[in-house]
Structures are given as structure tokens and as C-alpha cells.
């Protein structure tokens, strides 16, 4: 599998042999070597009298290694055999059946326990596992150019706030559009990434596990890592300053006051503008960073809804009122969060939440189970009914 991990590709890499290649030869020259990728690549050689290798029964697949001065080859790959090839024979960089089959079978789950581990392009799920409480682990993403475009899921399996993972882009790559090269994944958080337009992008998070948190007991900057921020002002008032993290664009994050004292938690943006003051235990402020570098207040009044006759079409934050049976959640321009509220306030009410858009922005149902429910695909839905003491899922 090692040679497949390092395979490179170049568009329209096709040329003619510049010299005779014996069946036992391990080095070759081509007329336009610059067309082929540096490093390891797979190629097919065929006679120049045929329009394509599919027409030449003597075609040969090779594994090539290109350096500044030579192209060395492993001959007769994938049930083909080494042949004598005349000057002028054709060679092209190709994707073969073995490569695709190897890739499909190798997509795997892997556990990372040490810093510095490099995630393989074949991994589809990676779990970060910790051996002690105060520990951070870093891991490096595969080259964006080598990734297939499928979703890569990384799970932080830690249960303490000091157990966090640092996800680092490979040299020359970035995470998001603003040039950052790493992001941090909080305890018990999950992040989903994909290569879009040649750039690693965060396309989804699981941020509402009970352990997905950062805890602040002193004033200072807050870098949102896709986790809840717990603010403990029991000793003195807290002044928290939200910092930009472009990798977390369009991800909702709550700041929650956890103490019973009269000390307030003050939340500011990077321009020192006061965004919110939390005075009571359990008071919360939701925010989201936009693609333009701004911070959006996601408190209930920032959402929108419309509809009649027991239905509502919602965007942003939406708190469930009585009399609504169907909610059409649209996250096409940001996010949608449906807060179901207390079951005692909605006794006997049945509610179905349906996602109506195809974007990767989050659609969430909250205040209903131990963690928020994510609706990830257009047309996905959940139905709940309140018994007066608890919400129960019925569909």
C-alpha cells in the first residue's frame, strides 16, 4: 500500500519514449518529462501505432519514480508483462484498477495516540486517544492533493478539557480560505473535513457532547474550537474576547455562565465591542463567525421564521412556540437551530423538523436529548411528542 499512498497525478501527462527500453530495463527517458509529476506515479506504455493503450494487447503498466535526472520504473504491474519498447512508444500517467480497488479497501478507522502522526489519505475516521488527563496530541492531515474528496472524520475521545487535539495541515496546505494551517479540536468533539477546491474545509462538527467544552475562570481571549465555552465567574467578573478562527466559519458556539454569583460575564468581539453580558447562572450567548470575519449574535431574536396553520419556515435560532406541528429548517445562508424548550411547556404537542436545503451548514434540534440532533441531508427529519415531562421521538 505504501507506493499507493505516495502516488501523484498530473493532467494530460502523456509523451513518447525518447530512447529504446529493453524488457529488463529499469530506467527510461521521455521527450517531455516535465509533463509528469515528481515522485511516484503509475503509467501505461503502449505502441505508437495504437490510438490508446486499450487497443494495444501488449500494453504494459509500470510504477514510475521521477527525480530531477531520471525516471525509474517497476515493470509489468497489474497482470501485464515487461516488453521491449521502441523509441517513440507512448507513455501516459493513469489511474488503474488496482489503485482504485486498493483505495476502496483501505479506507479505514484508525486510532492516533502520539503527537506527530500523519493521517493517511485512506483513513475515513480517525480517533484521537489519550493516556493521561493533561495531554495534547497533534496530527497532520494528508496532502490535500492526495485526498479523494470524501469526508474525513476526526474524533477527540478525551473526556477532560485539557485533552485536546491540534489538527495541522500538510506543508503548503491550509484549513479554510484565510490561510490558517491548523485548528484545535476540543475534548469529546468531532470534526468532519473535506478537500473542496483544493483546500481543506471544515464541513461539519459534533460539538454538543457534555464534555465538548472549554472552561474559563479568568479573563482573556477565547478561540472557538467548535466546543461550548463554560465561564466561571465565581471569583471575579470575567471579560472574554472572542478571537477569529476562520476554520470554524458558520459553526454555532455557546458561551454559558456556570456559577451562582452576582459577578457578570462580559463577552466582546475583536474590536472590543460588547456583545453580551451574562448575569445569571445558566445564562448563555450563542455566536457564529462569518466568512467575512464578523461575529453574528445567535440569540433567539437573531433568527427568522414565517408560516401559518401549524407550520413554520425557519432560519437561524428558533424557539418552538405552541401550536406548531411542522418546522421547515433552511440553513442555505448560515445555520438553523430549533430549540424545543421544556417538555412541560409543550405537553401533548407533536413536532416534526424537516431540513429543506442541500448545504453543509448545520441544522440542529436542541433541548431534547443529551446532545443536539443534527439533520445532515435535505429531506431528513425527526418527529417528537411531549408527554409533559419528557420529549419522545416517534419518527
Image (tube, rainbow, N blue to C red):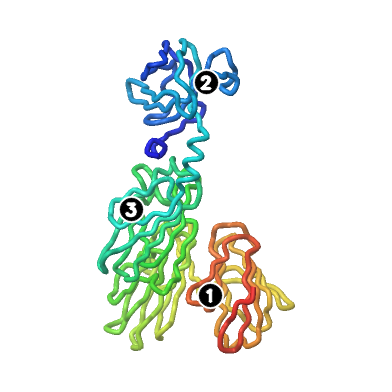
Task: Please tell me which residue is depicted at 62% across the width and 88% down the height of the picture.
Answer: 347
Quarter residue 261 falls in: bottom left
Task: Please tell me which residue is depicted at 49% across the width and 24% down the height of the picture.
Answer: 80
What x and y, as percent, mark residue 367?
A: 52, 78
Residue carrying label 1: 366
Mark 1 secondary-structure assignment: strand
- What is the spatial separation of the Cα atoms under label 3 and label 1, in whole angstroms? 31 Å
* Image disc number at residue 139: 3
Quarter of the image for the N terminus: give it. Answer: top left
What x and y, as percent, mark residue 340?
A: 57, 79
Residue 133 visible in image? yes
Task: Please tell me which residue is depicted at 42% across the width and 37% down the height of the picture.
Answer: 4
Mark 3 secondary-structure assignment: strand
Compare marks 3 and 1 and give the one earlier in the sequence.
3
Viewer-side label of 1, 2: 2
**Label 2 packing within 10 angstroms: few (<14), some (14-19), many (20+):** many
* Image disc number at residue 59: 2
What x and y, as percent, mark residue 215?
A: 33, 74
Amino acid at each position: 500500500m505504501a507506493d499507493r499512498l505516495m502516488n501523484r497525478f498530473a493532467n494530460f501527462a502523456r509523451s513518447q519514449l525518447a530512447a529504446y527500453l529493453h524488457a529488463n530495463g529499469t530506467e527510461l527517458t521521455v521527450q517531455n518529462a516535465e509533463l509528469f509529476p515528481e515522485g511516484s506515479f503509475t503509467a501505461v506504455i503502449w505502441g505508437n501505432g495504437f490510438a490508446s493503450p486499450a487497443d494495444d494487447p501488449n500494453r504494459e503498466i509500470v510504477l514510475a519514480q521521477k527525480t530531477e535526472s531520471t525516471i525509474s520504473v517497476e515493470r509489468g504491474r497489474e497482470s501485464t508483462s515487461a516488453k521491449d519498447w521502441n523509441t517513440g512508444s507512448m507513455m501516459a500517467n493513469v489511474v488503474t484498477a488496482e489503485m482504485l480497488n486498493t483505495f476502496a479497501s483501505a479506507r479505514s478507522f484508525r486510532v492516533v495516540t502520539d503527537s506527530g502522526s500523519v493521517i493517511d489519505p485512506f483513513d475515513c475516521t480517525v480517533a484521537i486517544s489519550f493516556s493521561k488527563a493533561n495531554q495534547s496530541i497533534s496530527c497532520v492531515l494528508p496532502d490535500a492533493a492526495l485526498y479523494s474528496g470524501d469526508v474525513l472524520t476526526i474524533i477527540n475521545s478525551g473526556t477532560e478539557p485539557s485533552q485536546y487535539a491540534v489538527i495541522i495541515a500538510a506543508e503548503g496546505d491550509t484549513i479554510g480560505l484565510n490561510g490558517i494551517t491548523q485548528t484545535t479540536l476540543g475534548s469529546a468533539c468531532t470534526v468532519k473535513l473535506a478537500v473542496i477546491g483544493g483546500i481543506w474545509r471544515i464541513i461539519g462538527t459534533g460539538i454538543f457532547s457534555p464534555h465538548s467544552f472549554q472552561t474559563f475562570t479568568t479573563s482573556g481571549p477565547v478561540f472557538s474550537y467548535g466546543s461550548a465555552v463554560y465561564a466561571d465567574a465565581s471569583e471575579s467578573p470575567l471579560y472574554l474576547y472572542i478571537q477569529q478562527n476562520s476554520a470554524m466559519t458558520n459553526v454555532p458556539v455557546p458561551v454559558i455562565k456556570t456559577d451562582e454569583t452576582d459577578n457578570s460575564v462580559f463577552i466582546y468581539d475583536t474590536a472590543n465591542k460588547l456583545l453580551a453580558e451574562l448575569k445569571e447562572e445558566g445564562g448563555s450567548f450563542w455566536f457564529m463567525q462569518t466568512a467575512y470575519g464578523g461575529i453574528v449574535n445567535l440569540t433567539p431574536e437573531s433568527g427568522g421564521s414565517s408560516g401559518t396553520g401549524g407550520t413554520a419556515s425557519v432560519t437561524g435560532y428558533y424557539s418552538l412556540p405552541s401550536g406548531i406541528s411542522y418546522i421547515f429548517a433552511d440553513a442555505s445562508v448560515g445555520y438553523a437551530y430549533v430549540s424545543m424548550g421544556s417538555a412541560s411547556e409543550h405537553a401533548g404537542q407533536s413536532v416534526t423538523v424537516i431540513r429543506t436545503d442541500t448545504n453543509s451548514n448545520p441544522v440542529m434540534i436542541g433541548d431534547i436529548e443529551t446532545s443536539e440532533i443534527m439533520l445532515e441531508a435535505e429531506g431528513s427529519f425527526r418527529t417528537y411528542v411531549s408527554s409533559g415531562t419528557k420529549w419522545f421521538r416517534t419518527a
